[in-house]
Image: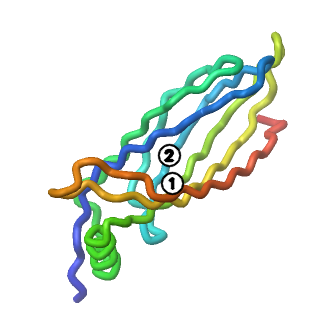
């Protein structure tokens, strides 16, 4: 039998919602945050719904907590090596349900799927301040006419 290792972690995710358009506001009705490591989902969180006004930038905070999550021996060994190398790669996925407000007209929902591959330095006994080393994001938007 292969021994199973357990992962306990707190992953803080900061989301920057930037609306550059002067005449459009956005309703964020649902924001689901998922964090994966080594292609395995390790935790998730939801951000409270909110309305973002025109020409505005909001910073949203998400806290993904993982307690005693079983991981394979291979994943545990890889994570320990990544921490030692001070370079841990995560995949952060956002599933967002949103509507747009133009003057007094509110649209049907859009589904926005954002996927970011990020590399960070982890917090350790000697490193108290994580650093974002790399971030590459892609976005797909779908109009939901019957929602």
Could you tell whether 136 is left or right of 39 in the image? right
Q: Residue at x 22, y 89 (%)?
A: 1
Residue 71: x and y, percent? 31, 71
Residue located beneath label 1 in the image:
92
Residue at (42% x, 38% y) in the render: 62
37, 18: nearer the viewer: 18
- Residue lying farthest to the bottom in this orientation: 1
Figure quadrant of residue 25: top right
Give the number of the mark in front: 2 or 1: 1
User: How many marks do you count on the picture?
Assistant: 2
Dividing the picture into quadrants, the one containing residue 136 is: bottom right
Residue 29 is tagged as none
**As displayed, is residue 84 above or below residue 14?**
below
Residue at mark 2 to residue at mark 1: CA–CA distance: 7 Å
- Residue at the disc numbered 2: 33
Does the residue at mark 2 contact the one at mark 1 (Cβ under 8 Å)? yes
Q: Is residue 108 left or right of residue 118?
A: right
Other residues around mark 1 within 10 Å, as few (<14) / some (14–19) / many (≥20): many
Instruction: Name the outermost residue toward the top.
Output: 104
Image coordinates for residue 102, horizontal then vertical, percent: 82, 18
Q: Is residue 21 left or right of residue 94?
A: right
Residue 118 horizontal/vertical position (percent): 49, 58
Picture quarter containing residue 117? bottom right
Q: Position of residue 122 (x, y in %)?
A: 30, 58
């Amino acid at each position: 039998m292969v021994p199973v290792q357990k992962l306990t972690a707190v992953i803080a995710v900061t989301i920057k919602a930037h609306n550059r358009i002067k005449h459009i506001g956005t309703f964020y009705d649902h924001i689901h945050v998922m964090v994966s490591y080594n292609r395995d989902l390790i935790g998730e969180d939801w951000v409270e719904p909110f309305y973002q006004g025109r020409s505005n930038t909001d910073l949203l905070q998400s806290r993904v907590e993982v307690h005693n999550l079983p991981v394979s021996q291979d994943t545990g060994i890889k994570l320990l090596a990544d921490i030692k190398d001070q370079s841990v790669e995560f995949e952060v996925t956002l599933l967002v349900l949103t509507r747009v407000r133009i003057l007094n007209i509110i649209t049907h929902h859009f589904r926005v799927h954002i996927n970011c591959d990020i590399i960070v330095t982890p917090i350790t006994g000697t490193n108290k301040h994580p650093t974002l080393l790399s971030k590459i994001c892609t976005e797909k938007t779908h109009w939901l006419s019957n929602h």
